[in-house]
Image: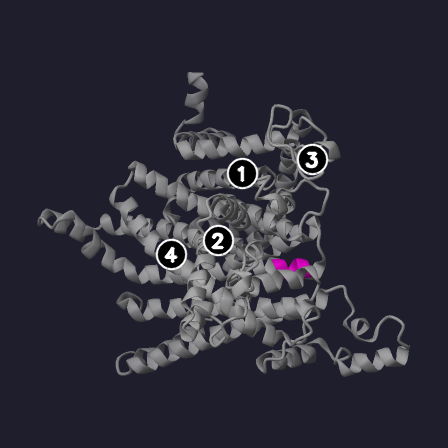
Amino acid sequence: MTTLRDWLIDDSPASPMQARLGRFYRIFGALMRNPLAVVGAIIILALVLTALFAPWLATHDPLRQSLSERLLPPSAAHWMGTDELGRDIWSRVVYGARITLAIVTLVAVLAAPAGLVIGVAAGYFGGWVDRILMGITDIFLSLPKLILALAFVAALGPGIENAIIAIAITSWPGYARVARAETLTFKNSEFISAVRLLGASSLRVNLGHVLPLCTSSMIVRVTLDMAGIILTAAGLGFIGLGAQPPLPEWGAMISRGRSFILDQWWVATMPGFAIILVSLGFCFLGDGLRDVLDPKSGEQR
Amino acid sequence: MANDSTTAAAPVRRAARPSRRRQRLTSLAGFLVTLAVTFLGLLAITFFIGRIVPIDPVLAVVGDRAPVAVYERVRQEMGLDQPLITQFVSYVGDVVTGNFGTSVSTGKPVIEDLARVFPATLEMATLGIILGVLIGVPLGVFAAARRGSWLDQGIRVIGLLGYSVPAFWLGLVGLAVFYARLQWVGGPGRVDIFYDGMVSPVTGLILVDSIIAGEWEIFRNAVWHLVLPASCLGFFSLAYIARMTRSFMLDQLSQEYVTTARVKGVPERLVIWRHAFRPIRVPLITVIGLSYAGLLEGSVMIETIFSWPGIGNYLTVALLNADMSAVLGSTLVIGAVFIGINKISDVLYRVLDPRAR
């Protein structure tokens, strides 16, 4: 074991592979020393495992209605009670993890690369390219995200796919800003000039050398944004513009439970706890990642 | 590029000494240009959203059994045969003159509806931000003063909860606990149904209107109803303000002048409130402005829960009825207020902070 550790933290790594693994090891170690980050990582891991193993974790079929078992309080048979159609809330929350995970993953996959490309292009080329791209970015940044997402979904039509598209449209500008700032710090460094002198095209310089250097701050930013994305998606679901019934989306579930909040409190509150837990997990992990990967940015949020 | 900078540098050097006023005028002009561009951007986005709606606006007017000639004529009357840029220009003209179209659900001009519902939102958000500042700032200062203590950890968690609790969920739970169980506050709506419409709207702010009318009973009832939604909103601004205050204070407390003050024997309370807190008042204004703008957005969810007749409720009803004129009108107004507040706090920061001038 000690030899593997020595190999990982070697000051003069023999191969890029060793250097990369060593870096990963150090980051991981630093992260594990931060208790909140560990809690966050465990929550996210739990979310992923719940989504993967939903059929095994769920005690009932999330869609099966059983009108004789309507609105039962939490009990041994129904851990979180049942909703107005007699569906088991625990099972629905478990399957809802899949939807939440799918939403945050898709938004990250759509918005982060778009923001990255726009930001790197603006930072690298400068001049009017920068002015136009950042002008558009700033306009989007100065508008309220939720309202914009609502308006886009209203135009595109309700549904989970459109909700994802709308959230992605409103979240790329933050990533573009981060990527541009990072690019500006690297742009004039010697190793970039060296690559350019070797005759590399600007596409190659950016893809091979600038983009990889932006990834760590992008990861921090994306993780910190996850909570907001989850809340927006749940909000769209709550209003009725996001995931449509009978999908067990947490926001939509809260919306169904709204009419019973005074007497059957569990219908609306249980999915809420799931949302809070997962969002908190992303916040904790994001804070921890920022302290490790991007210590200079501080509390700017 | 190189040429540009040499020619530009000369006049700048000459102008630098004599005229500070001119410099201010240029920065004011620059500010107005960004403001105008941002508003145009907002208009472009709402215009674009209006275009991608899959509903044919002409069919909505003529019905789907109209003959082709009628369809074409209406299409021309609505200006939809014009190039997009012409349509955009006339759209901007409409918005500037206050023509936001007619709402399908209320049958009234959108601008009238918005003027009617906006005060309710303003009232709730303003009380929310007052609560957020009054509680959030001291919490942040205490957390920084006792860094690492349980109090600090607790405030940190509250700060993060502000990012992770869904507003609509908080409102529902608040209603269940404080209205249904404890009966400490009033239920949904601005006043009890019994009092509805009893004071004539002068400002639209029911607290002010009831004072003007001298109806203290209604005033008390309105406060009773306002407390819970405003507290829910206030929680989010509290969380954000406390978090930012804490980080600003920590910055200041690590400065050398604070150490100097402590060494001189200044009592800790004075060190914190007089030495460390004073310099952060200016950046806090920006934070409070941002938070206030954010509350206008957050009120969409809270208003739905509390049946609060504000712009958020209007927007959600319009969303569900696919009433696009109302949706885009509300988006424009919320967006414009949002931009306005952000820019104002930006300007205040520059005016008040001598370093930023």
Say if residue A188 shows up in the picture: no
Q: Secondary structure at mark 2?
A: helix
Label 4: chain? B
Q: Which residue is mark 1?
A: A273
Residue topped by disc 4: B131
Q: Residue sitting at 61 percent across and 30 percent down?
A: A50
Disc on res. A178: 2
Amino acid under disc 2:
Val
Q: Amino acid at mark 3?
A: Arg
Q: Is residue B323 visible?
A: yes
In the rendered structure, find residue A205 and report the number of the disc placed on it. none
Residue B13 shown left or right of residue B223 in the figure: left
Residue identified by numbered label 3: A70
Q: Position of residue B129 (x, y in %)?
A: 40, 59
Instruction: Give residue B156's quadrant in the image.
Output: top left
Q: Is residue B235 above or below residue A21?
A: below
**Span colored in magenta:** A150-154
Q: CA distance from mark 4 to mark 2?
A: 33 Å
Label 4: how many Cα within 10 Å (few below 14, some 14–19, many 20+): some
Q: Earlier in the sequence, mark 2 or mark 1?
A: 2
Mark 2 packing: few (<14 Cα in 10 Å), some, or many (20+)?
some
Q: Is residue A284 above or below residue A183?
A: above
Foreground: disc 2 or disc 3 = 3
Q: How is the image coloured?
A: one colour
Which of B331/A254 is in front? A254
Front position among marks 3 and 4: 3
Q: Chain of mark 1?
A: A
